[in-house]
Image: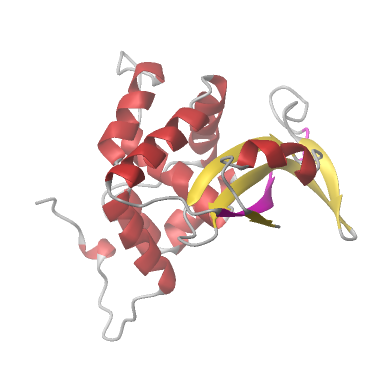
Amino acid sequence: MKQTSLASHGFKKYAKTTRRAVFLNEMERIVPWTDICKLIEPHYPKAGNGRPPIGVERMFRIYCLQQWFNLSDPAAEESLYDSECMREFVGIDLGVESAPDETTICNFRHLLERNELGRKLFEEVGRYLLYKGVKVSSGTIVDATIISAPSSTKNEDNSRDPEMKPTKKGNQWHFGMKGHIGVDSKTKLIHSAQVTPANVHDSQVLPDLLHGTETRVYG
């Protein structure tokens, strides 16, 4: 059993299990973490003479938190310090270690994008859910969420990330990417996902979010 420091428990007299904690406990149980990590490991940096890389599973869990809770790289780092249930989900004990910084989180996200692993990971999750008897119904809910990114050019390259684009939602401008998801209307499980620059209209991605046997689609 892994030992934890006093920092991971505190001295709380009163506590309540939040909906976020319940959700993360369910994902802990459902997601095939070992199988997914095997897909990422061939592309992940190996330990060498420099600082050893953070574990694949830990980084993928942080990546999942970003998708589930719409967190940018800086917000993901901050949330790991702010939320105890997120730290427990990732496996971070602030009594003995710090959370990965936003640059490390960003580099991992780019690694998945560069090696086109997103679709493979979702297919692996889908196969696992089918094995567990979770089936996709005939209805799909489609939605899109803007994933914000720093728009400043005060960095080493003196430029913005070329994969990020500006878009206007309501009366407010945003800069970053957009996560498009297809959700089963009955089980509320995500069965498909696409990531595009933020200026791509939702309708352009719709065909990629459907599994093909729907009798109804919700937006």
Does 151 appear above or below 170?
A: above
Nearer-the-camera pick, 194 or 81: 194
Residue depicted at x 87% and y 50%:
168
Instruction: Say whether residue 17 is left or right of residue 150.
Output: left
The residue nearer to you, when weighing 71 against 38, is 38
Residue 112 image position (x, y, % from top left):
50, 27
Q: Residue furthest left?
A: 1
- Residue 150 is situated, as x and y percent measured from the top left of the image, at 71, 42
Q: Is residue 212 left or right of residue 153?
A: left
User: What residue sits 38% from the left and 40% below the top?
Assistant: 125
* The stretch drawn in magenta includes residue 149: yes
User: Can you tell which quarter of the image residue 38 is in?
Assistant: top left
The location of residue 211, given as percent across then percent down, is: 56, 40
Q: Is residue 94 above or below residue 58?
A: below
Write the start and end of the magenta stretch as one range: 139-153
Q: Indicate left or right for 211 with 50 as reference.
A: right
Q: Residue at x 49, y 59 (%)?
A: 188
The residue at the far right in this view is 171
- How many numbered marks does the figure carry? 0
Q: With respect to residue 34, does 98 lie above or below?
A: below
